[in-house]
Image: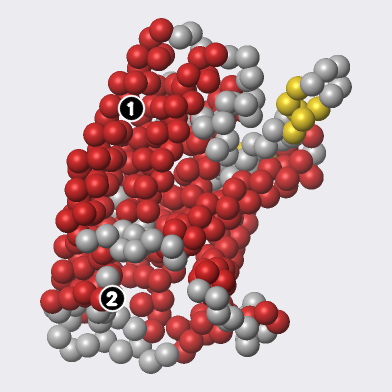
């Protein structure tokens, strides 16, 4: 048994998890601030300077509230559902490269050669938590929310998978670190200029890559039940949807699971389309070129890569929040029509478009 490998893996987990949980907590604060800015109101400003301690107060409230379990629920599954909603989103981060190297150690917990398939396999388990929550509550509104969520997630998972196939066709590998390495050497999937300027084929592929990026991002919105796709918990129709009967920390797990799913989805988008931890830096030594800053240049360079990765995630999280407070909720028939008649077909045609370009252009 390789005890050094196990120890390093635990160290990476111990370092990554607090960062993700911290981003999750302050994503809630950021969403309240952004929504307040959009709606021209103050937002949280009482607990701590500028309201910065509000997430800590919210966490304390969830932990200290009375944990009440209704008598009419199926207790085992009622307790199990919040865990199933949160754990898959955290497990998915195990294969995401969140940096280059630090002290010579790759900044990915499990660098498996089927990384994206692992992401889809584990992330798809999140729907079980919502469905079980709706069923075990023995109440009509949670049950309707669970049914909506299951059909919505199954519908948009198809588009999610199809949107990634063009990336596989270009890179030829399923390992996430290899996809990031390809973008470092050839330019980001949706930004060919961030790398190889002269490759005409890469510029032609920018269109199908952009289509994949848009389809994948829309599908991530639907998979994370974010507005305008938050039909499973539509307050105006279903009271609170699948978590109507939940309170205290069990409701908190659902609430926090949604934000961790947003972080995970943003991390996958950054890895597949936005170069992962890579940020091209212009250099003029011996002529203009893009310089690569990675962990081989020292500890500060490795920390810089980690910072860039999470900065890209922060930008995408801001986009998630901006969309939520700018667009109205779809009707359910509109949501399903968008998924099956538009998004699915666009993703399918985009695969053929990518294949045709690759057949005639040598990269």
View extreme (front): residue: 40
View extreme (bottom): residue: 66
Residue 193: image tag: none
Determine the residue positioned at 67% across, 84% down: 48
Determine the residue positioned at 36% across, 70% down: 254
From the image, tell me which residue sits under label 1. Answer: 350
Q: Earlier in the sequence, mark 1 or mark 2?
A: 2
Q: How is the image coloured?
A: secondary structure
Number of other residues with Cα within 10 Å of mark 2, as a class: few under 14, some 14 to 19, many 20 or more: few
Name the spot of residue 79 as percent of width and height, x first. 28, 75
Please count the marks in the image: 2
Identify whether 325 is placed above or below 220. below
Determine the residue positioned at 41% across, 14% down: 358
Label 2 residue SS? helix
View extreme (right): residue: 285
Q: CA distance from mark 1 to mark 2?
A: 36 Å
Identify whether 13 is placed above or below 30. above
Decide: marks 1, 2 in contact (CB < 8 A)? no
Name the spot of residue 147 as percent of width and height, x first. 16, 62
From the image, tell me which residue sits under label 2. Answer: 235
Name the spot of residue 30 as percent of width and height, x first. 56, 68
In this orientation, does residue 7 appear? Answer: no
Q: In screen coordinates, is 29 left or right of 292? A: left
* The quarter of the displayed image where residue 252 is located: bottom left
Determine the residue positioned at 72% across, 42% down: 302
* The quarter of the displayed image where residue 173 is located: top left
- Tell which of 55 and 236 is nearer to you: 236
Label 1 residue SS? helix
Number of other residues with Cα within 10 Å of mark 1, as a class: few under 14, some 14 to 19, many 20 or more: many
Name the spot of residue 347 as percent of width and height, x first. 30, 33
Q: In screen coordinates, is 193 left or right of 160? A: right
In this orientation, does residue 284 appear? Answer: yes
């Amino acid at each position: 048994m390789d005890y050094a490998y196990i120890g390093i893996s635990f160290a990476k987990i111990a370092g990554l998890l607090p960062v993700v949980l911290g981003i999750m907590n302050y994503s809630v604060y950021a969403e309240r601030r952004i929504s307040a800015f959009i709606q021209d109101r103050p937002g949280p400003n009482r607990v701590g300077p500028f309201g910065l301690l509000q997430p800590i107060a919210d966490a304390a409230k969830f932990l200290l509230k009375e944990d009440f379990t209704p008598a009419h629920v199926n207790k085992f599954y009622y307790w199990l559902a919040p865990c199933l909603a949160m754990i898959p989103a955290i497990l998915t981060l195990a294969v995401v490269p969140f940096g280059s190297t630090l002290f010579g150690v790759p900044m990915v917990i499990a660098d498996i050669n089927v990384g994206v398939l692992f992401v889809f396999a584990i992330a798809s388990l999140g729907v079980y938590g919502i469905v079980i929550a709706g069923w075990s509550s023995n109440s009509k509104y949670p049950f309707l929310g669970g049914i909506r969520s299951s059909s919505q997630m199954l519908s948009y998972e198809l588009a999610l998978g199809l949107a990634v196939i063009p990336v596989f066709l270009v890179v030829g590998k399923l390992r996430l670190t290899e996809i990031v390495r390809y973008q470092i050497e050839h330019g980001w999937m949706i930004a060919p200029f961030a790398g190889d300027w002269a490759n005409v084929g890469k510029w032609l592929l920018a269109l199908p890559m952009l289509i994949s990026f848009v389809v994948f991002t829309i599908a991530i919105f639907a998979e994370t039940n974010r507005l305008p796709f938050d039909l499973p918990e539509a307050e105006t129709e279903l009271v609170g949807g699948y978590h109507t009967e939940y309170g205290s920390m069990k409701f908190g797990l659902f609430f926090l699971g949604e934000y961790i799913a947003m972080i995970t989805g943003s991390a996958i988008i950054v890895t597949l389309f936005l170069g992962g931890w890579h940020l091209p830096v212009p250099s003029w030594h011996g002529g203009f070129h893009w310089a690569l800053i990675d962990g081989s240049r020292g500890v500060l360079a490795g920390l810089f890569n980690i910072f860039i990765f999470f900065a890209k995630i922060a930008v995408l999280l801001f986009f998630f929040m901006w969309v939520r407070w700018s667009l109205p909720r779809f009707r359910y028939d509109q949501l399903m029509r968008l998924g099956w008649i538009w998004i699915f077909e666009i993703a399918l045609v985009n695969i053929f478009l990518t294949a045709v370009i690759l057949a005639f252009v040598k990269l």
